[in-house]
Image: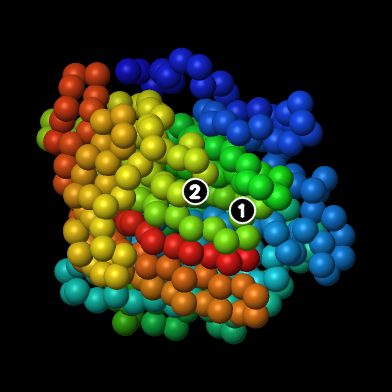
Amino acid sequence: MTSDDFPPGLPPAPPAFELGPAGRVSDGRFFGPIADVSTAKWDGRGPFARRRRQRKAWIYTAAFTPRFTVGLAVVDAGYLATAFAYIHDRQREVFTEQKAVLPAGFPAKFQPSLDVPWRLVRGSRSWEITRSGAGWAAKHSGSGLGVDIDIDDHGRGLTAISTAPGRPFHHTYKLCSLNCRLSVRTEGRVVTEEGHAALDFSLGYPPRDTRWNWASLDGTTADGRQVGINLVAHFMNGLENALWIDGAVVPLGQAVFTYRPENTLDRWNIATVDGYVNIDFYPDGERKENLRAGVMASVFSQPFGRFEGQIRTQAGLVTVSGRGVTEQHRAVW
């Protein structure tokens, strides 16, 4: 594979969300981002319009360095906006998190994209992901915790679009195996490291009751090649499943997550039915949330830890290991 390769039959992303013959956005997966992701034609107006009731959008990044696992996200869930930043310091075995929930934290006219500033402020704390040069800057500032992630965009992202009954569509853009520089401030100390990051931009109208398992993994093969993996089950029809290796993005088949839902800190096995991925994931800890606000709820566990297993390449099966996150999620929105 070369940096210009992409598996046959997968076209570049369309310039905007395109309507199919039935007047709905067509399912599919594509190379690269959609340039115009405006949802104005579906959103309506007013406090009870689809923009507030059904449209959800978020931007999330995870960073993996020799010492730290970091997660940072900003979410526009319509009637609510949320944000979080956390770090797991493996050297000190310390987990630190700061988060916020704000009613209608984004204005009605907010049109999410990869290029607009995502920023949420609550008191002296702020969470922000913005374009910076050829990549993104993800930042959190709060008493006792500061996070700065400078992320490079290698331009090899995967767009996936999937429809659901009663909803126009849901869309996501995934990037893995990105170079990054991380600076963490805790207890007055600043530590800076280089590592790799993943970026998730999602926008659309997911089902009212949405459930998924998800994994975002960053690792290295036994022969020294950098690898990124994004996998999902029970959501998006598996269209966002992909492997980043040797400068290419390889779409993957459906993923199967085998684990104990009642104890998400036990070992997970994650495999794809096409045989390209089979890994075991061993959590170090987890971020959990049980958010309930009126008719809305978000209940999830996101373990972070290490993984090892095998992936299939053009040269055959190779051993891979690294760091990542998994997730068990149910949202009612």
Residues at marks 1 and 2 touching, judged by CB atoms closer than 8 Å: yes
Kind of residue at disc 2: Phe
| Residue lying at 36% horizontally and 64% vertically, measured from the top left | 302
| Residue lying at 39% horizontally and 61% vertically, measured from the top left | 328
* Residue 4 against residue 273 in the figure, above or below: above
List the residue tagged with mark 2.
Answer: 235
Left-right relation of 71 to 65: right
Quadrant in the picture for the N terminus: top left
Q: Name the one closer to the observer, 119 or 210.
A: 210
Residue 95 seen anywhere in this rendered image of the structure: yes
Left-right relation of 122 to 68: right
Q: How is the image coloured?
A: rainbow
* Residue 207 against residue 7 in the figure, above or below: below
List the residue tagged with mark 1.
Answer: 206
Q: Position of residue 137 (x, y in %)?
A: 50, 55
* Residue 126 against residue 266 in the figure, above or below: below
Say what secondary structure mark 1 lies in.
Answer: loop
Q: Name the one closer to the observer, 21 or 184.
A: 21
Say what secondary structure mark 2 lies in.
Answer: loop
* Residue 231 against residue 94 in the figure, above or below: above
Q: Position of residue 61 (x, y in %)?
A: 45, 55
